[in-house]
Amino acid sequence: MCADPSTLSDALWFLCYLTTGKHLGFYASFGTVLLLLLVTAPAALLLGFGGAMLARSRVAPLSWIGKAYILLVRGIPDIVFFLFFVIALDQGFEYLRHRLLCPDWDQPVRQGNDFVVCDIAKLPLSSSPQWMHEVYGFFLAVLTFAIVFGAFAGNVLFGAMRAVPRGQMETAEAYGMTHRQAFWRVLVPQMWVYALPGLSNLWMVLIKASPLLFLLGVEDIVYWARDLGGSKTPQFTDFPHGDWRMWYFLFLLVFYLAFTRVSEIVLDRLMRRFTHGQAVAGGEAQRKAAMAGPA
Amino acid sequence: MKRLLLASALALSASAALAQDVVRIGTEGAYPPYNFLDDSGEIAGFERELGDEMCRRAQLTCEWVTNEWDSIIPNLVSGNYDVIMAGMSITDERDEVIDFTQNYYPPTASAYAAPSAEADIQGGVVSAQAATIQAAHVATTGATLQEYATPEETVAAVRNGEADAVFADYDFLAPIVANSGGELQFVGDRVPLGGGIGAGVRESDTALRDQLDAAIQAMKDDGSVNELLAKWFPGETVPSF
């Protein structure tokens, strides 16, 4: 049916048009973006938590490492990370593999502008199928996103840990808990209520930063929207059309708005949970409401 | 003895790996008729067909990948792919950073396209793709250069009035002008630029360059380059060698 679209009625034409291989790629890229967010958010949180723990360490060098990570990464413009750091990271991995796998290599790795490592040190190998290159690119993207957002999350968590009233920790110590026990049993469960507003901001920014994937060579929704929306002349496609980028980007706008709205609802629920039983204004309000209601 | 055996086994496996070496070709995928994505999302166009034939003759397994035009050279030199075939004109500036094979597309003219014949191409706003010979040329004229990341955007800029004219390869603009229903037309004289289009390789990859060069030469000799040119660039002036 779709073999000769120029003879089709409008509805069928669109049915064929919206199911071309290119469009399927476009739909699949939504999955890529969602997967990136789902993987990156916990990874960044973990990095941030580690950074915050290091930064509050009583061992000075550890604390310097944590603070330096948070300070440096937060201070470096994102564009530097997404343009320069990824190529450097990739070359760093390949250089390490090169040293390990090809100890007999006698040529320099840097030859003028070229970065040359032995064939078996390439990451992924140039003989590996394209999907492995894509997975590797995706992995680099997740790592970069996690490092950048981890620093911000680290700062939020560092502040949240300090916001838990000192009395809570003192009480824990008075009960004979060790420092570690007090940290995990008293401080960590209570800090989320202070961290969540900052973290939810970060989540929103992360959602909106996902088009940066495109800079990293991952074919994301913006890449496809731009390509599909561009005007097409009849020689090169069965579905010629004018400049439709506005419609594609409008669709992206709706997607992002819907996605951030759903996130807001979920985050609100989370906030209510974390506030429950806490000695903060929100927790106090919950307590009063519960008391005023039918017992 | 054992070590010797091991070494020869390694050498064997190394040459076996070389024989089935995969050469990755980077392209932009947004510059019809040179290279573009067809309806199924595959890379197609003049360079795809020419490149596949070139690889067949050079007995290489080639894999095509797309990359942003802006970062197409940095990704080549850092080894993410091995060859650029992306409608890239051979220029002295680029030759300092990477190497080119001989051209597989003859030096041809670039042209201005605009909504009206009165468009001011010498003093008005002219759009061109960033980091191209066309952008460099516009910068030397009296016109204000408006740069865009993709070829598509340079044309869209003229359609929506952001620019008075677009300056690009004649053969890229020809199908667009022909299908614009009179909305766009060529304006002014054509400008010969660059030394034709060649395949870019890393400067350290001389063996690969010679291999591709020989394949292109063979295709020029038996006329298959001209056939492909005639197929993909029909019209009043068919480029040929």
Image: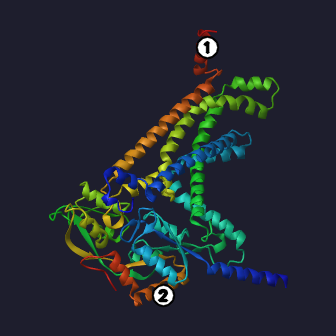
From this view, report whether residue B159 is shown above or below residue A183: below
Q: Using the numbered discs, state the Cα–Cα distance from disc 1 to disc 2 in whole angstroms.
A: 83 Å
* Count of all numbered marks drawn on residues in the image: 2
Quarter of the rendering occupied by the C terminus of chain A: top right
Residue at x 29%, y 80% (from the top left corner): B238
Mark 1 residue type:
Ala
Instruction: Name which quarter of the figure residue B101 lies in.
Output: bottom left
Q: Foreground residue, A14 or B115?
A: A14
Residue located beneath label 2 in the image: B214
Res A269 → quadrant: top right
Vertical position of residue A80 compared to residue A54: above or below: below
* Quadrant position of the N terminus of chain A in the picture: bottom left
Residue B142 in view of the camera: no
Q: Mark 1 and mark 2 in contact? Answer it, CB < 8 Å.
A: no
- Report the chain holding disc 1: A
Position in image of residue B77 (x %, y %): 52, 71
Q: Do marks 1 and 2 share a subunit?
A: no
Above or below residue B53? Residue B120 is above
Residue beneath the point at 52% across and 76% down? B202
Labelled disc at residue A290: 1
Q: Position of residue B89 (x, y in %)?
A: 38, 75
Q: Residue at x 40, y 82 (%)?
A: B103
Please state which amino acid type lies under the numbered disc 2.
Ala
Which structural element holds mark 2?
helix
Residue closer to the observer: A66 or B150: B150
Q: Residues within 10 Å of mark 1 (few under 14, many from 20)?
A: few
Does residue B4 appear in the picture of this structure? yes
Colouring convention used in this rendered image of the protein: rainbow
* Residue B240 in picture, x, y percent from top left: 32, 83
Residue at the spot 59% in from the left edge and 57% down from the top edge? A140
Q: Which chain contains the residue that carries disc 2?
A: B
Question: Where's residue A288, x and y in %?
Answer: 60, 13
